[in-house]
Each structure stands twice: as C-alpha cells, then as structure tokens.
Image (cartoon, rainbow, N blue to C red):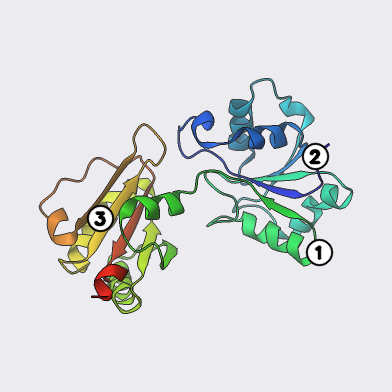
Amino acid sequence: MLEPALYLIPCTLGDSLHERVLPEWNREIIMQTRHFIVEEIRTARRFLKAVNKDIDIDALSFYPMGKHSDASQFSAYLEPLRRGEAVGVISEAGCPAVADPGADVVMLAQREGLKVVPLVGPSSIIMAVMASGCNGQAFAFHGYLPIDPAERQKRLRQLENRSQLENETELFIETPYRNRKLFDDILRSCQPKTRLCVAAGITTEAEWIKTRTVAQWRQSQLPELGKVPAIFLIYAGQSERRKKR
C-alpha cells in the first residue's frame, strides 16, 4: 500500500527512454497512484503510457497546473491527499517544481504539513552543471533572459560580472528556435576568457555538451539547435583550486 504523499515524479527529457533515466521505484509509485497534477494533460498521459503501456489512463484523474490554469484551484487538487490518497506531480520535462509551476502546489502542501516526496530522475540543470566543468559549488539558474536584444545583452554582461565577482556559474535557457540568437548575443556580449557551456538534448540521442572560452567559440561552429532544448552556462570566475594558489 502506497503511503499518502505528494510524489514529485520526474519526466523524461525530450525523446530519452524512461528505462535509461528513471528508476523502477518511480514506475511502482506511478502504478499505485490515481491522481496526477500535471503541467499539460496530453503530454502527461503520453508519458505515463510510455512508462507502462498497460496503465489504465481512463481510470486516472488529471489536474492541470500549466500557465493557462487557474492557480486558485491548486489547493483543491490536494483534496485526494487530504483524504489519504497518493497524488503525483508531473512536469513537461525533468523534475517537477524546478523552474516549473509545480512549486506552487508543493508550497501549498508544505503549508498544510502534508508529506512531500521528491523522486529521483533527470534534471537538465544539475546535469548541465555536472558536465560543464564550471563551478559546481556555486551556481544559479536564471530561466529566460529578456527578448529585447539590447536588454538581453545588458543582462548577459550583468551575469558575467556576477559570475566573476561571486565565482558563480550562471545558467539560463531559451526557446529552441531562438537558441542561435542567444548564442550569438553571448559571443557578442561576453569577454574572450569567459567560459561558455552549451548543453543540448541532455539524455537524448541528440545530446551535445561542449565547454569552451568565448574566444574559442568565436572560432567554432555551433551545431543546429533550432529544435533542441538547450541550457547555456557562463563562468567568468576562477576554480577553487586556482584561487588557493
């Protein structure tokens, strides 16, 4: 019998196979859960079917928490948990409540003292830091940068300055079709010695992760990323080892 809790269920990133990135325990929890708070119902249903093709989707209840959902209804989504039933939270990709509206639902549960259980699964933010070679002791995720070119370049210079002063890795993302424009703005705005990591298609067959200085990137060819989710990391600080010398 599954313990009543709000289970934060990671989803695959892109077209990666769930067997490669999700433990068996996640599948067992999914199969014992009948209520799911999800970012998008259609993609959540598809994810659950991929986890177990025999799951009875029509026997499940879905509660939307996407950007067009009514946040005033989120508290009502927790009613099954208050009755002693398990409730799952599923994002569009990766870990729920990290750069995701699931955080609002988790906060409601925490305020009421309801049990919250995070499950193991892929996090593009953490995996990008792991593979970048940049500072993993101090890093910050900033989501989307301004769309206006002038404001975006200004923000990039601010983040680069922060990275240098705080010895911190700065992470941010963009809509895939604007990846190239963001890449160009980074090369235009940042100093030659600043390190830039491009981490794209993490855990998928299209995975591509490279870290170079801005100067080196200016002499390199970026692969086509117009349809691939990517995270960009800049690091203008010094490694802890170098600082101690």
In the image, 29: left or right of 143? right
Residue 228 at what x, y percent from top left?
36, 41
In the image, 32: left or right of 67? right
Q: How far apart are marks 3 and 1 (CA)?
A: 43 Å
| 87, above or below 140, in the image | above
Q: Distance between the residues labelled 3 and 2?
A: 46 Å
Quadrant holding the N terminus = top right
Element class at badge 1: loop
Residue shown at 86%/53% (left/top)? 82
Marker disc for residue 47: none
- Badge 1: few (under 14), some or many (20 or more) residues near its Cα, within 10 Å? few
Which of 223 and 242 lies nearest the eye of the viewer?
242
Q: Which of marks 1 and 2 is nearer the N terminus?
A: 2
Q: Distance between the residues labelled 1 and 2?
A: 20 Å
| 5, above or below 169, in the image | above
Residue carrying label 3: 183
Q: Please state which amino acid type lies under the numbered disc 2.
A: Leu
Q: Please state which amino acid type lies under the numbered disc 3.
A: Phe
Residue carrying label 2: 2
